[in-house]
Image: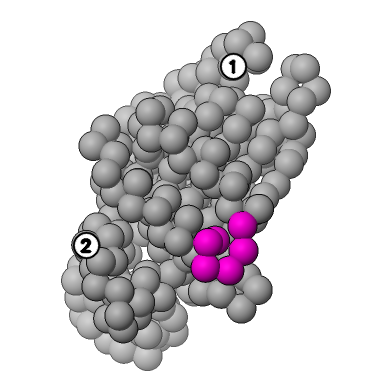
Amino acid sequence: MLIREWIGNSQGHAWRLNHHLAESLPFNFHFHPEYELTLTLGGTGQRHIGSDLEGFDQCDLALVAPNQPHSWQAPARVDGGQIELQVVLFRLDWLVSLAENGMPELRHLCQWLAQIRQGVVFSPDCTRIIAPRLAQLHELSGLKRLTALLDILAELENDQAARFINGELTQLDPDRRLIRAMTHLQNHYLQAVTLDELAQVAACSVTTLKRLFAQQMKSSFSQELSRLRIAHASNLLLTTDRGIDWIASQSGYPCLSHFYQQFSERLGQTPSAFRRQAKAHSTQGRHRV
């Protein structure tokens, strides 16, 4: 299930720094209104950001846009070593406030962040530069810690080899009716949810809700429903050995042919090919450790 993650401030600041050590990374598809910068060290697996699925290996750096579902997944290392995660979470309104109240140097950074749709995967060269700086953040405090963070964000903006993940444009201040509709959809996408039902929850007409989807998400109800269900199916394909027909039924698809069609349209391959590719990548990763 897709989870809405609630994240508080760190030590009274408008951003948060987390450091994790884990034996493996379980699939945990979730979203939150903050940007998330994640550095993954020592693991090999799959990175999910929005509709994008890609393998990562040993040293990976990616930025997730607000409200974009995402998850990292990696099996345990053969040598028993731990996988390290350095995670920075921050909100754009905080940086905009700084830019408008005495730090105009941040305006270009704010504009760069605002146009990111689903996320950004940074180049190996940029990742090697950023990795030690993220580690150093834990040792700093006060103004030095803040300026180090801003330097890191500025460095990301300069990565000309970064890969921008295409997808729906993220709105900074979405309509509350759309938020209510999306929250209901994210809680009931495995059921026979309808657009009429979402309109009732949002307290607006079906026509208005269609317009909100189109204008603020550059998407539609059916596209969002498909995205959530295919993400759920991808999780089952990666974490179980059950048959495709069972996975389809557990992902809200009573019609198997419809499942195959939507899965192939979104991920560019059949469910079976997706599973084989993921297993092959995992095996190759274990051999490289």
Identify the residue at horizontal 53%, vertical 18% (top origin): 281
Asked if residue 65 shows in the view, the reply is yes
Does residue 55 appear to the left or right of 100 in the view shown?
Answer: right
Q: Position of residue 148 (x, y in %)?
A: 48, 56
Identify the residue at horizontal 29%, vertical 49% (top origin): 157
80 over 131 or under it: above or below: above
Q: Which mark is residue 285?
A: 1
Residue ranking furthest to the bottom: 203
- Range of magenta residues: 140-145
Q: Amino acid at mark 1?
A: Gly
Q: Which mark is residue 21?
A: none
Residue 162 part of the magenta segment: no
2 vs 1, front mark: 2
Identify the residue at horizontal 44%, vertical 80% (top origin): 180
101 over 79 or under it: above or below: below
Q: Position of residue 257 (x, y in %)?
A: 39, 36
Q: Position of residue 58 (x, y in %)?
A: 57, 25
Q: Amino acid at mark 2?
A: His
Q: Which mark is residue 108?
A: 2
Q: Quadrant of the C terminus?
A: top right
Please tell me which residue lies in front, 90 or 239: 90
Reading the chain from its start, which is encountered first: label 2 or label 1?
Answer: 2
For label 1, the crowd category at 10 Å Cα-Cα, with few meaning under 14, some 14 to 19 and many 20 or more, is many
Q: Position of residue 37 (x, y in %)?
A: 48, 51
Magenta span main SS: helix
Q: Quadrant of the N terminus?
A: bottom right
38 over 128 or under it: above or below: below
Asked if residue 188 shows in the view, the reply is no
Q: Secondary structure at mark 2?
A: helix
